[in-house]
Image (cartoon, rainbow, N blue to C red):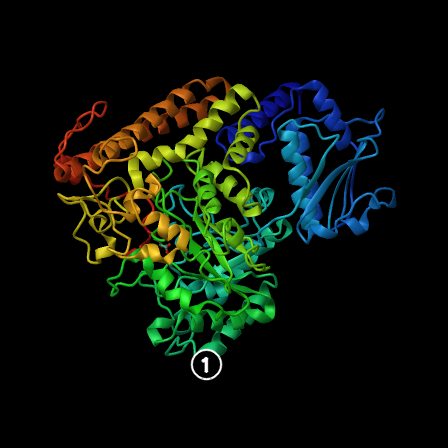
Amino acid sequence: MNFKKTIVFALFILLTFNSSAQEGYDLWLDYKKINELEYKEKVSSYFSNIELIGNSSTIAAIREELQIAKAGFEFKNHKSGTSNKLIIGTHNNLPVSVKGEIKTDSLGDEGYSIIALEKGETLVITGNSDIALLYGTFGLLREIQQRNNISNLEIEEEPKIQKRVLNHWDNLDRTVERGYAGFSIWDWHHLPGLIKPEYKDYARANASIGINGTVLTNVNANSLVLTPQYIDKVKALAKVFRPYGIQVYLTARFSAPMETGDLETADPLNKEVREWWKNKADEIYAEIPDFGGFLVKANSEGQPGPNNYGRSHVDGANMLAEAVAPHDGIIMWRAFVYSEDDPDDRAKQAFSEFVPFDGKFADNVLIQVKNGPIDFQPREPFHPMFGAMPNTPLMMEFQITQEYLGFSSHLVFLPQLFEETLKEDTYANGENSTVAKIIDGTLPNRELTGMAGVANIGTAKNWTGHPFGQANWYGFGRLAWDPYMKAREIAREWLRLTFSNDEDFVQPMTDLLIDSREAVVNYMTPLGLHHIMATGHHYGPGPWVDNLSRPEWNPVYYHNADKKGIGFDRTTSGSDALSQYAKPIEEKYDSPETTPEKYLLWFHHLPWDYEMKNGKTLWTNLALHYQMGVDQVKEMLSTWKKMEQYVNEQEFEKVRMLLEIQLKEAKWWRNACLSYFQKFSDMELPAGVPEPEHSLEYYKSLEFPYAPGISPSWN
Ligand code: GCW
């Protein structure tokens, strides 16, 4: 290569590298150049002298990650003049000189320790498995990305939850149910032959935040994925993920023995059916020995299940559990059920159906429960099943994709929502029996624990569509590792890894992220309102919808607005869903005066002129909340506009335009909902809330036939 060519080539590399970073492909693993010279000097001295012990594929992954990081940070090679070194090895492999200084007995299989020894000259990452070392390596890189001093580190980290899994609602045709970031990243057609680089980068990203499992397919399941042709494809993905400690799981369609086998029934008590599932499990495990198990949506929204044969959820789950048990597999059985024939309050149904089965599920079954009793709304009280099944491991299901929170157009920092749920007190075992303690196996003490997040990942160049959607993937992983982490801490961390360590950026942007959750609640469903979105795609407001075949699909079912007032009475005078909670909650929420105002209309139907704590009427407060939501988005936009110097131009512009969309849509929600509710309240809008720009008829007439996220499984 001559000089000119070299320059052109170098430029090309620079541009390609930059453009992928600019498009957000590198996520929080964009190891930016270190400009602080002294810091760089110090840290690179450890990296010039690395002793990485072991030779597994995970060790190879660590070596590769260190190289990527070194290149990104632009470390120099220190040939001499320093005795600093970095040792990475499992405890039993450590050199004797340091081994005795460190204890890893309490770290379990996945926990790690990063410790500076010998006056800070030796940095050791250790644990009891190679995966622990990988987690530790990512832990150390995170410190460096945040420019923290690493010469005095003393970190001990152990995941508090055992199964930390993403749920992909991805179909085999690559559409993604409730996906707003393009198509499915699983290119089934080209698998197993074509292994895309994205697969490994996906695994790196997940491992870096401690995610150790992925359910590849939609819970509205297709049994084809259980056929040999597809098992071969799944095997290829599992091979890429294995070094990163990520197990694959599949969704099991309950009727698979009929659809892909030759059986005439899928009755879980039928001998042949049981045999079929056992053979299927053996077949999968023969190909994928570390296969995780199955996730099942049964007898819910049209999916087949044991009830079709007069059998119970226990019969169904335990049959599958028996099939995977010899291979150490687990069954994640979803509790998201509500019946089309049951006129009872939908919020009560999962509890009514599952709680009587407490203690009856096999040991390798986890019941997967959504955070709230309805369906991933901007705000819901915690699901009353948490705390009500002491003899059954319950796992949390959060939704990372923003089905009801503005798709990938709105900036909403979900860890704030997750934290709120995790911190709620269930009173299952007296005071301070938080949801986090129920799911992490503290109350009661148990080993099998889990947290699932419905992924927001797709083929978008930056994985999540909205650049800030990445924060929700990141935050989910961090909370699955440690459900006691604070959203604020996660926000800071993510901002620093992704954009900049400058406090003038980090502080205002942390506030922006934290406030973004309350903003969406305000402009969509304030004061406990819920499920008032448009039908099908769920994009935009639709509080007027009243014509759907199932009553509990209609927004009017949930808000009950009439001339007298608004809200869902869930006290004893109404559906009595409140009695599913522990006594202290039941007593407190029984009266509107003592119900937290954020849940007011979730539990009570109240007159429009009901006087709230601030002395103003319910109607006035409702209107002011909608307005506050709009104002908060305005504020977000104005904060963002001051951040231009900290982010690249492309990303700056993208977020700015998305915030403009969010602002427009926040106003749309406010206008549409207030004009509709005003028909009933017959009251004036308070000062500060503008008259809607259009008539109610106009808002009702809006249609979005191609809004994303609708899956063919609904057709
Ligand atoms: O909220 C509903 C979604 C469905 C989804 C279902 C579920 C996968 O609208 O698209 O189906 O929840 O969680 O099973």
Estimate the x, y position of residue 135 in percent, counting from the top left.
65, 44
The quarter of the picture where the C terminus appears is: bottom left
Image quadrant where one finds the N terminus: top right
Cβ of mark 1 under 8 Å from ligand 1: the answer is: no
Q: Position of residue 175 (x, y in %)?
A: 38, 50
Identify the residue at image location x=48%, y=60%. Answer: 250
> 355 or 321, which lies in front?
355
User: Taking the image as drawn, is residue 170 in sight?
Assistant: no
Residue type at tag 1:
Glu
Element under disc 1: helix
Image coordinates of residue 236 in percent, x first then y, are 56, 56
Q: Nearer the viewer, residue 467 or 77?
A: 467
Looking at the image, residue 589 sits to the left or right of residue 135; the answer is: left
Q: Residue at x 62, y 30 (%)?
A: 145
Q: Which residue is mark 1?
A: 272
Q: Residue at x 26, y 63 (%)?
A: 340
Which residue of the protein is positioned furthest toward the bottom in this rendering? 271
Q: Is residue 444 above or below residue 201?
A: below
Residue 192 visible? The answer is yes
At a point 54% along the width and 30% down the height, the residue shown is: 492
